[in-house]
Image (spheres, rainbow, N blue to C red):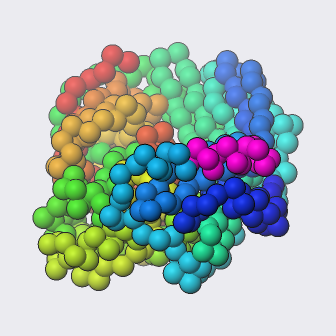
Amino acid sequence: MLSPDRIQETFSRLQKFTSADEVEAIIAGGHSALTRFANNTIHQNVAEEGYVISIRVALDGKTARATTNRLDDESLKRAVQSAEQIARVQESDPDLLPAPSAAEAGKENSVQRHFGATAAIKPEDRAAAVEQIVSVAKQHKQTTAGVYSSSESMEALLNSRGLMKIHRQTSSEISITMLASDSSGWQKANSPNVSNLQPKRLAEIAAEKASQSTHPREVPPGKYTVVLEPAAVLDLLGFMFFDFGGTALLEQRSFLNNRIGTRLFGENITIHDDAYHPFQSGATFDGEGVGRQRVTLVDKGIVRSLVYSRATARKMQSSELAAQLGKIDPTGHGFPLPNEIGDAPMNIVVEGGNHSAKSVNDMITSTERGILVTRLWYIREVDPYEKILTGMTRDGTFLIEDGKLQGGVRNFRFNQSLIDMLQNVEMLSNSVRASGEESFDMVVPAMKVKNFNFTELTKF
């Protein structure tokens, strides 16, 4: 990967090509590879290495960005010229702030997210893991498909006011689907540290789900107690966190408008944004280089705080909303400028149970009649203010009766308010790092929820 000296040298070269008031560069890239398998065999193995440099200039209150994937002088010069040409035809932005200095950006705590064993993963290592997964599939007379990917990456942000931030990280991820004659099972895991992945164990869980859900029965739709495994929780909750950015509230497109400081969820719901949590990944600075702060978004059901970019914090401080929001400062949650999003929390940690934490099995045992949901898909927002979502279950949906799984059921479509759901959580497991398909990875618990609204059956 690019060394700090090479990163600094690249930025120094591009500075020679601009006469802009300010210049900023985000340099990102590294090496990534994946092994894809289907029908119990590997059918694709690809790898790539490359870097992208995104250059932003500021000219007379105007800003624009241009990008290149080449680091030679001529390519840097063309990208700088493109950014300047685009900036000159923009309208002046009264909210544009000077780029932060190193002192203004602040320092963040160090985290360990680069692991040598993950960086050293070879195609043979991924193939060996796939062999274990296929072996499990064959033992159960099933067919498996999925992906095993790994990467080593870096992200650096530098600007002409002396700021330089660098983050290095590794990543490993496995996604497994097991197919039986009329049922399926699924598992997915992601970690910077490959030692946290257990390919065979994931395969065994997915295969067991497929085996136990064969010949799914038809259960009528309606309101059920549901046990949502962490992947299902994550993909639902992911639809609300962009509303916790200050920009969304200012633009009145947040479901939190007129709800800050109220008890919106159950008392057992506490949510933080915490880039330093040991289960988290990603850089500890935002798209402007500002250090990320740990922010409690929801405390025992009460919406307490939002997150802010630098410009949004400044606008919020002089807005009519300031009085109801308490202390307003940049929290290190901005995206690279220019952007339309402003800010959002991206390192979500939902507190699980403490001494009374229940496992998924405990939740099942305590349920007289309900539904176990492994994962969800095709989720769409129906009502943005009440946060009503629709979507479908898949890859492991089970009937619970008298505290036991009674086999698979046909999948459901749901229409469910997230607000109502988080008011009706009866049990929480310990929180884990979870991966889904509809949202970014989070640290979340499994949840037992009453009155979850299934509206119809699907055709599979």
Can the viewer see residue 125 in this picture?
yes
Residue 222 is situated, as x and y percent measured from the top left of the image, at 17, 34
Q: Nearer the viewer, residue 441 or 318?
A: 318
Q: Nearer the viewer, residue 99 or 218?
A: 99
Residue 65 shown left or right of residue 53 in the figure: left
Q: Which residues are magenta?
A: 70-83
Q: Residue at x 77, y 31 (%)?
A: 46
Q: Nearer the viewer, residue 335 or 15?
A: 15
Residue 452 within the segment the image draws in magenta: no
Residue 17 shown left or right of residue 455 in the figure: right
Residue 55 is situated, as x and y percent measured from the top left of the image, at 60, 53
Q: Residue at x 57, y 36 (%)?
A: 206
Can the viewer see residue 352 in this picture?
no
Residue 210 is situated, as x and y percent measured from the top left of the image, at 52, 29
Instruction: Report the quarter where the N terminus lies.
Output: bottom right
Q: Nearer the viewer, residue 336 or 227?
A: 336
Q: Residue at x 13, y 64 (%)?
A: 258
Residue 170 is situated, as x and y percent measured from the top left of the image, at 72, 55
As drawn, 241 above or below 399: below
Q: Residue at x 67, y 43 (%)?
A: 78
Q: Which of the 4 quarters of the picture holds residue 20?
A: bottom right
Q: Which of the 4 quarters of the picture holds residue 42?
A: top right
